[in-house]
Each structure stands twice: as structure tokens, then as C-alpha cells.
Image: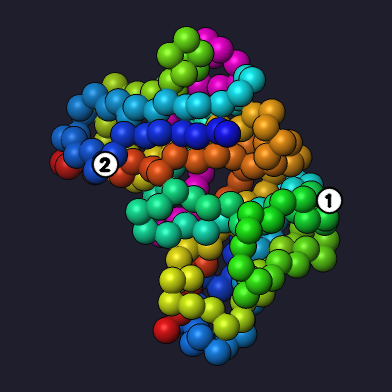
Amino acid sequence: ETGVTQTPRHLVMGMTNKKSLKCEQHLGHNAMYWYKQSAKKPLELMFVYSLEERVENNSVPSRFSPECPNSSHLFLHLHTLQPEDSALYLCASSQGSSGFYEQYFGPGTRLTVT
Amino acid sequence: GNSVTQMEGPVTLSEEAFLTINCTYTATGYPSLFWYVQYPGEGLQLLLKATKADDKGSNKGFEATYRKETTSFHLEKGSVQVSDSAVYFCALSGYTGRRALTFGSGTRLQVQP
């Protein structure tokens, strides 16, 4: 596969469940990102990893827990979510994390919290 | 801090019409500017970019010119097609210590046959 892939594409979970979102990039990039896209709101940056080290955390609630085991994989672990967490979660990667590099996005995971 | 302002949508056009989607920004220093497009059910794709003043980014018939004097990066296309229907995001990056892009709220384009 090429580019940035995300699994699952759709996820429905109850507020007491625990689930994980997975992102994989096949571009040889060093930086990976999680974004949240809600209806009628700008994209919200959640986390940035550069060379597997978390370099930015935008005041995201602790019920979202990221993990970056290597430069190709990024996870978002979810637990005790709220209905307002329902959104499209997008993963992206870039060659570097300085902000000047264009980002390549995956197709997203559509999350519904019931 | 950095910010991006886009015109609100939806923008509805007939096929072959001229398209302009306005984008203005606030940033310190000399940011790079981007337009991303999101087709239904997909993630964002880079459409074009410009890295310094007066640069023109272009791709697939779309163009945008980096105007430092007006802090703008308006997206244009001379003749839109139904397949251009999507949401378009303006974004910037720069020397703020922030390690990712700042996006506008997106503008939905609907092209009718």
C-alpha cells in the first residue's frame, strides 16, 4: 500500500468501551499527526509526533491517548468517550515537523459515540 | 498567533463557471501557504502551495498567488467541473514554534451540471 492508511474507516462505540484507531504511513516520513474534524468546525490538531517523540499536545482530554511505536505507525487509544467526541479523526504525516512540510492525510476514521 | 479566514460556503456554481474562494491570513514572519481539498468520504489532499511572496501555486487548473501586501491566498479556477465539488481548506505554516498547519474552516463547493 502507499500513502497514509487508517483503520478502521468507521467505528461505533459506547461511552464505556475502549478502542484504538490505527494509522500507518508508507512515505518514509518522520512526523505524524492526529486531527479531529467535527461538523462546521475547523480542523483541530490533537497531537504531533516527530521521530516517535510527542512534540505537541493541544490540551486534549486524557480519554484520548496517543502512541507512536515507530515512525511509520501511530495509534489513538480511546476510552470513556463522550458523545461530543463523535467526529472524523484524521491522521497525517510529513517529512519533517517544522510546519513547512506539506502534510499527507489518510482517509480518516468516522467515529460515532453512542 | 496564526489564523486563517475563509469565505463561508456553500458556493454553488454551474459547470464551466469561474471560481474564486477567498482566503486571508494572519501570521508572523513568512508563512508557507497551502490549499487542501477534501472529496466526499476522503481525507484531505494537497492541491497547491506557495512558499514565498508573489509565488503562484497551480494544479489541476486551480491557481492561487501568495499576496503578502494583502495577506491573501485566494483560490481560482477558470472553468469548474462537477468533479470539483468538494470542501476546500486554506492553511498556513510558519515560524511560530507550532509544529503543524493552521487551517481555515473550509469552503464547500457544489458544481451543478
Viewed as shown, does residue B10 lie left or right of B28? left
Residue pictured at 42% horizontal, 84% vertical: A114
Q: Which mark is residue B99?
A: none
User: What's under tag 1, amino acid-wise?
Assistant: Leu
Using the image, name the chain to which the residue with label 1 belongs.
A
**Badge 1, how many Cα within 10 Å: few under 14, some, many 20+?**
some
User: What's under tag 2, amino acid-wise?
Assistant: Gly
**Residue B55, position in %: x, y?**
54, 14
**Residue B2, position in %: x, y?**
55, 33
Residue pictured at 60% horizontal, 16% vertical: B52
User: Which colour style is shown?
Assistant: rainbow
Disc 1 and disc 2: Cα gap in Å?
Answer: 38 Å
Using the image, name the chain to which the residue with label 2 belongs.
B
Can you see residue A30? yes
Name the image quarter holding the C terminus of chain B: top left
Label 2 element class: loop
Q: Which residue is mark 2?
A: B9
Can you see residue B109? no
Q: Which mark is residue A51?
A: 1
In depth, the one of A109 and B6 nearer the eye is: B6
